[in-house]
Image: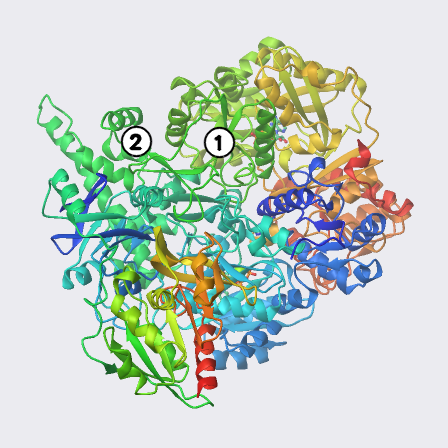
Amino acid sequence: MKAILALEDGKVFEGRGFGAVGESSGEVVFNTSMMGYQEILTDPSYNGQIVVMTYPLIGNYGLNEEDFESRAPFVKGFVVKEHSTFPSNWRSQFNLDEFLKQYNIVGIEDIDTRSLTLHLRNYGAKKGVISSVDPDKNRLVQKAKDSPSIVGKDLVSEITASAEFRWEGKTQVKPEGTFKVIAYDFGIKHNILKKLCSYGCEVTVVPAFTPAEDIIFRKPDGIFLSNGPGDPEAVSYAIKTVRRMIGLRPIFGICLGHQILALALGAKTFKLKFGHHGANHPVKNLITGKIEITSQNHGFAVEEGSLKSAGLVLTHLNLNDNTVEGMRHEDYPLFSVQYHPEASPGPHDSDYLFERFVELMVKGK
Amino acid sequence: MPKRTDIKKILIIGSGPIVIGQACEFDYSGTQACKVLKEEGYEVVLVNNNPATIMTDPELAFRTYIEPLTLPILEKIIEKERPQALLPTLGGQTGLNLATSLADSGILDQYGVELIGAPLKSIKLSEQRELFKKAMTQIGLEVPRSGIVKSIDEAKILARRLGYPLVIRPSFTLGGSGGGIAYNLEELKRIVMMGLDLSPVKTILIEESVIGWKEYELEVMRDKKDNVVIICSIENLDPMGIHTGDSITVAPAQTLTDKEYQRMRDAAIKIIRQIGVETGGSNIQFAINPDSGRLLVIEMNPRVSRSSALASKATGFPIAKIAAKLAVGYNLDEIPNDITKKTPACFEPALDYVVVKIPRFTFDKFPEASTVLSTQMKSVGEAMAIGRNFKEALQKGLRSLEAGYSGLTDSTETKDKTIEEIRKRLIVPDRERVIYLKKGFELGISVDEAYHLTKIDKWFLSQIKEIVDLEKELKEYKKESFDLFEKGYKKTRLEIPSGLLQKAKKFGFSDKQLSSLLGLDEDLIRRKRKSSGIVPVFKTVDTCAGEFESYTPYFYSTYEEEDEGRYSEKKKIIILGTGPNRIGQGIEFDYASVHACMAFKDEEFETIMVNCNPETVSTDYDTPDRLYFEPITKEDVLNIIEKEKPFGVAVQFGGQTPLKLALDLEKAGVNIIGTSPENIDLAEDRKKFGRLVEKLGIPQPPNRFIIHSEKAKISATQLGYPVLIRPSYVLGGQAMQIVYDENSLDAYIKKAKEVSPEHPILMDKFIEDAIEVEVDAVSDGEETFIGGIMEHIEEAGIHSGDSSCVLPPYSLSEEEIQKIEEYTRVISKELKTIGLLNIQYAIKNEQVYLLEVNPRASRTVPFVSKSIGIPLAKLAAKVMVGRKLKEFLPQKLPRINHVSVKVPVFPFIKFSEVDFLLSPQMKSTGESMGIDKDLGKAFAKAYIGPSQFSGLPKTGTVFISVKNKDKRGVVFLAKRLESLGFRIVATSGTARVLTNSGIKVEQIYKVKEGRPNIVDRLKNKEIDLVINTPSDGTSHIDSFSIRRSAIEYNIPCITTLSGAQAAINAIEGLLKEELEVKALQEYF
Ligand SMILES: Nc1ncnc2c1ncn2[C@@H]1O[C@H](COP(=O)(O)OP(=O)(O)O)[C@@H](O)[C@H]1O
Ligand SMILES: Nc1ncnc2c1ncn2[C@@H]1O[C@H](COP(=O)(O)OP(=O)(O)O)[C@@H](O)[C@H]1O
Ligand SMILES: [Mg+2]
Ligand SMILES: [Mg+2]
C-alpha cells in the first residue's frame, strides 16, 4: 500500500503505508534513539507530533504490556525506514504493525528517513501529513500547510487525566518514611511515577487544570510537574497554578513541567529549530562538573538570559548546543530539568535527581 | 582537566607480529595514539617488532624501536629513554602483558615510570578470571558459575554440580589454548587432562556453559572525572559458544528493548568503576538468556581491542585516539567530536545504519584443521559492511570477504547438500553457517526449526529468510524466460520489473549475484539498472544520525534517494585497499595503501580510499581525504568512480584484490595509474609471461601447462621429478604442492577436479636445494630502483612468506647479485613498470632462475623500507603521478652497515590438528623483524618476535632429529652446538650418526618406544631447542607429536637445516655479546 508524507514546505516522500490506513497531520520531528520505540510511541509528550525514527530498523523486538509509558500511544504518525514483521524477544507480545493498527496510528516506511532528518535539521521541524488514502501530493502539501501549528496550542488538555487518581505502584519505604507527592499530569510518563515510588513517594496524579488551592490545602510533601507535549506558553492555566504554589512546598519539574515552572517564575521560553529528541545528549551538571548522558524530548526550551531576573540559577547545561537543561531557585525549594531523568527510553545517569527531590521533601517536612 | 604537563615522554608497547586474535587493529590503535600524543607535544617512544605497521614509521614517534618485545630489552629501552609514563592499553594483550610484567618485576618503579590509563590493580582484576568473578559478585552482577580444579577427580565432582556442557579454560596458557567445551564425561576427562598438562600452574577453570545464549559486547569509555559513555553496542549473530572474533556481529544491538539494553549499560558502568580502569576504553562481554533475559557478565578487556577497532569504524568515534587523550589528563567534555566539530566527544554515538562484521577464515591453508567454531578464535581477518538494513549489510559483508560469495549465495560446499546434511551442519557451528542457513531455508527449513538447530536469534533468521524468499522471486524471471524459449517464442526474456530490481538492490543483492540468478551478463544488469535510474547513493557516517552537520567525509553506499557525497572538482586519486586480512595478504598491503595515500596527498591530489577491513589504518577517516567503507568489487568500485570521477585509480598497493580488477576497470574506461593493466595481466599470466621471459633470455625453471589431466604424467617425466604444481592466478601459494612421484601426482590431479584450457595446471621443475631471493623495486618507466635484495634462509620450496629472510644478502656472490639486478631491470623495463615490482628468484649452482614477478606492492615492502630507510611505497605513488625517481633518490645510495632479518610467525598453536610443516603454501600470519650490526644478532632479535617462541636459548639441551637426507649436514651443526656448551639429545637414527662423528649424545625414546620419551621431556621443559626436519614435507605421526608439543610448550622448533644453521649463528652472537637496542632514528 502506497503512502505519502508531505511537509508544509513542499517536500514530499513516497513510501509504503503500515499500521492504520488513513491520514494524519502533526509536527514532524526526528528521534535518534536506537532503541525504545515503544516508550517513544507511548510518551504523551509526542501528542501532536509525527515521529521519524532515525534508526532504520524498528519493531525488531516487538512490543509488550510492561513497557507502555502511558495508557496508549499519542504520536500522530510514525515514520520508519523498515518495520520488522518478525519481532523477536522473550517479552514480545505484539508486532509494531498490529499495534499501530489497533491504536489507529498511520505509519509510513521505506522512505529515505536520513534525507528527511537532514531536511528537518536544516530547515527546522515542519508541519506534515502522512496519508495512505490520498495519492495527490499537492493536495497533501496544502493539507500540511493548513494543519494547525503546535505553537500556541494547548496540547495538554487533550491528554491529561480526566480525574485524579492514586498511582497503584508499590512504594519503596525509605528510612525517612514515605512522601506524599501530588503529580500534575501534563502528559506524565509511567516511569516517572514508578521512579517516584521507588524513592519512597506515594503519588496522587491530578489533572492539569486542578487549581492550586485544592493542592495547597492537602499539604503534600512535594509537588511534581510532569512532562508533556507542545508549547508551554499555551498552558497558561498551569503556569498560573504553579505560580501560586511556589515556595509553599518543594517542587520538582521535568520537561514541560520545567518550562512551566520557569514561565511561572517569570523566565522565558522559545521554540528550538528541531528540538532535542534522543537518548544520547550530554548534559553537564554545573555543580559537580560531571556529565550525564540524557534522554531528551522537547521542542521548546528556557532562555538562559531570562533565568537570573527570575531568581533562577542554571544547574545543567546541554553540551551540544549550550541550552538550559536544568535550574533551581535561589531561595525556594524547587528545581527542574529539561531532560528525562526517568529515562525510558534512555540512560539512567540522572536517577539521582529523584533523590534530590526526596532530600528537599525531607528538609521541608 | 587540561593535559598533564608533568609527563614529557611516553612509552608505548605495540602488539608485535600479527597472530590469530591479535591483528592489525592494534596498528590502527597504536598509530592513532602516537599521532595524537605527538600532536599534544609529547615525545613518544615506541617499541614494536612488527615492521609492517604504520606505527613503526619513524615519523610517528620520537624514537621507534624495532626490537624484541621482552623484559630485558624493554628495560634497556627504558633505561636509555627514561620515559615518565607507560601507556599499556593500546598494544593488545601483548602490550598489556608486558606492561604487567614490567610493573611486577619492579622495573617501572626503579625507573620511575608511571602506568597511565589502567592501573596495575585493574589489569589484574580483569585478567584473572577468578578475581574478576569475585569482583562482579561484589557489585551484584551474575557470572557463569564456576570452580577451579587441579585434578580430574575434582573436575568430575564439579561437573556434577554444574551440569554439562562445561566450558574449560586452563589457567595461564597462551591464547586460551587447551580450552574447550565438554558435552560429556569422556570429553571432560580428555580436555581436563590436556588442560592440566598445558597449564603452567596446573589449574583449570571449569565454568557452567551458557552455549546458545545471546552474546553482546559494549565498548565503554571513562575519564578521570568518572564520566562514562558507551560508544557502541554489538550483538553477536552467532550465540555464546562461538568466540566473538569468529562470530558474525552486528552493531548496534538489534533485539534488545530499551529496558534490557539499559540494564546492560548500567552493568557496564558499574563494572568499569569496580575494576577501576581510570581512563580509556574497555570492552565488556555479556550473555543474555534468550528465554528469560537473565544477564551474565562474561569478561572484560581493560584496553582497546579488536571490537573497539570495529566500534570505531562502525560509529565514527575514534576510541583509541580519545583513549590516548584521556590518558594524558583530558576529560571527555574537553575533547571535540572530530566529525561534528561543534559537539564534544562526551556523548554516545547514534547510528542510522546497520553494521555487520563477518570473520574471514583460511582453513584452505590447513586442510587438517577442524572447521568447527568454538570458544577459541580461528579466523584471521574480518570484513565490515554498512547498510541501511541488515540484509543489505550482510550481503555487502559477504561479498567483501572475497571468499567466493557475491552475496548470500551457495558455496561449492553447500551446492548439492540435502536437507538432512544441512540440518547436521547447522547444529554444529561451522565457518559457513550463514551459507548453510541460506541453503536450509531454500530447502524448506522453517525459522523455528533453524532457531532450534542454531540458537541464532529468530530476528536474524527471519531477515536471512527474507533474502532467500526474494531470491526465489527473482529466479522466477530466469525460469520463465527459459520456458518461453523452449516453446520457440521470439521474445526470450521476461523483463524483470524495475520495482523488483530496486527491491533486490535494497536487499543488498550485487549485480554479479543477480547476473547468476537471472542468467544475464553482469554488465547488462548494470546497464539496465542504470537506465532505470537504480543507482546507489552515498551516505555519511556522522556519529549522530544526522542531528548535526558533519565534516568528515566517511561514506557507505545504499539504495535510497539523497546522495550526500558533495563531490569536489579537485584532481583525485582512488586507492583500492586490500579487504579482509588473510594469510598471504595482510597488514603489509594496508601499510602500502596508507603510504600511497600520504604520497598522493603530498602531490596535492585529493585521496580517496576504498576498503572494507575495519582493523586497518587505511580505514581511519584521518588517513585519506575521503573514505568509502565498501566492498572491493568491480560493481562497488565503479559506483564510486562514477560519482567521484577521479583522475586515476591505484590498484597496485592493496595486493591481489585490487590488482585483479585492473583489466575490468580499464575496460569500463577508468584510468589505472602506474603499470598498465595489460602489463599487469602479462606478469600475472604465467603462460604469457613464461614466453616473454624466454624471449628475454632469463633462465626460469622448465615448465609445462597442463590442460588435459592425461598429459600430466608425461610432462612430469619430461621435466623430471620433483615438480611443483599449482592452478594459475593465485596468491599465497594456494593449492600449490611439490610432487615427488607419480602416485602423488595422480592424487593431486584427482583432487583438482577440473583440468581444462580455462583451468590449466602449471607444472614447474622443482629446483631442489636452491637459495631463494626476493627483490622489491620501484620504477618510473625509465629508471628502476632496487630497494632491496633479500636472501632467504630457508631454501626455495618454502613459500617466500614463510621463509626467514636477510637484507642485505649474506651468501650471494657479486656476480649473482649483479645478475639479479640486471634481470630485475630488464623485466621492469619490459613490463614498462611504473610503480612497484616484486620478483622472486632461485639460485642454484650460480644459475639465477626467475620464479615469479608481482607487478605490485609485496609483503616485504615495509620490511625493505624500514631496513633501508626509504619508503618504497611512497616513491612508487609519486612516480605513478609523473614524478621521476632521480628527484627523490640521492646519486649514490648510502651504504647500509646493518643487517635486517625477518622471521615469520605461524598460527599452528590455534590448530591442534595441524603439523608444523613448511611448504610452498604460505601459512604464516605475520612476521617480526630484527635489526643489528651483524646477522647473528639480527636473527636472534627477529627470532624472539614470534610470540609463540621465547627466543633462542643460550645454554641447555638441544633435541635433534632429522630426516635421512639431512643426517650428514646436521653433524657439523651438532658439533658447533656442542662446542657452544649445549647438551645434545637425539632419537636413535640421528643419535647413531652423531655418535659416529664423535659427538656426545644422549639417545632418547621416540614416542612409541617407551617412556620417558621425547614428548615427556618436552613437556617437562627439559629441552630448550628442537631441530626436527620432517621427511618429504609430509606429516608423520611420531615427529608430528614432537613438533606439536614444542609449539604448545613454547619451545623454539626449527624444521630446516638452513634455519638451524642461522639459529646457531644467532646463538653464537648472543653468547658473545648482550643484545643492544637502537632506535630507527639512530640508524638513518
Ligand atoms: N560460560 C560460557 N558458556 C558458553 N560459551 C562461553 C562461555 N564463556 C565464554 N564463552 C564463549 O567463548 C568465547 C571466548 O570467551 P572469552 O571469555 O570472551 O575469552 P577471550 O579472552 O578469548 O575473548 C566468548 O566469546 C563466548 O562465545
Ligand atoms: N620451480 C621452483 N623451484 C623451487 N621452488 C619454487 C619453484 N617455484 C616456486 N617455488 C617456491 O614456491 C613458493 C611460492 O611460489 P610463487 O611462485 O612465489 O607463488 P606465490 O604466488 O604463492 O607467491 C616460492 O616462494 C618458492 O619458495
Ligand atoms: Mg572475549
Ligand atoms: Mg611468491
| Residue labelled 2 has its Cβ within 8 Å of some atom of ligand 2 | no
Q: In the shown orientation, is residue B61 left or right of residue B235? A: right
Q: Secondary structure at mark 2?
A: loop
- Mark 1 → mark 2, Cα distance in angstroms: 24 Å
The percent coordinates of residue B653 (x first, y second) are 56, 28
Q: In the shown orientation, is residue A49 left or right of residue B851? A: left
Q: In the shown orientation, is residue B1027 left or right of residue B708? A: right
User: In this picture, is B804 found above or below A182?
Assistant: above
The percent coordinates of residue B312 (x first, y second) are 51, 48
Q: Which residue is mark 1?
A: B657
User: What crowding class fits label 2: few (fewer than 14 Cα within 10 Å), some (14-19), or many (20 or more)?
Assistant: some
User: In this picture, is A332 found above or below B743?
Assistant: below
- Residue at 62%, 33% in the rendered image: B859
Q: Secondary structure at mark 1?
A: helix
User: Which image quadrant is residue A354 in?
Assistant: bottom left
Q: Which chain hosts label 2? A: B
User: Which image quadrant is residue B766 in?
Assistant: top right
| Residue labelled 1 has its Cβ within 8 Å of some atom of ligand 2 | no
Colour mapping used in the image:
rainbow
The percent coordinates of residue B551 (x first, y second) are 47, 39
**Mark 1 belongs to which amino acid?**
Thr
| Residue B163 visible | no
**Residue situated in front as seen by the camera: B130 or B27:** B27
Q: Which residue is mark 2?
A: B535
Task: Indicate which disc, 1 or 2, sits on the residue closer to the N terminus.
Answer: 2
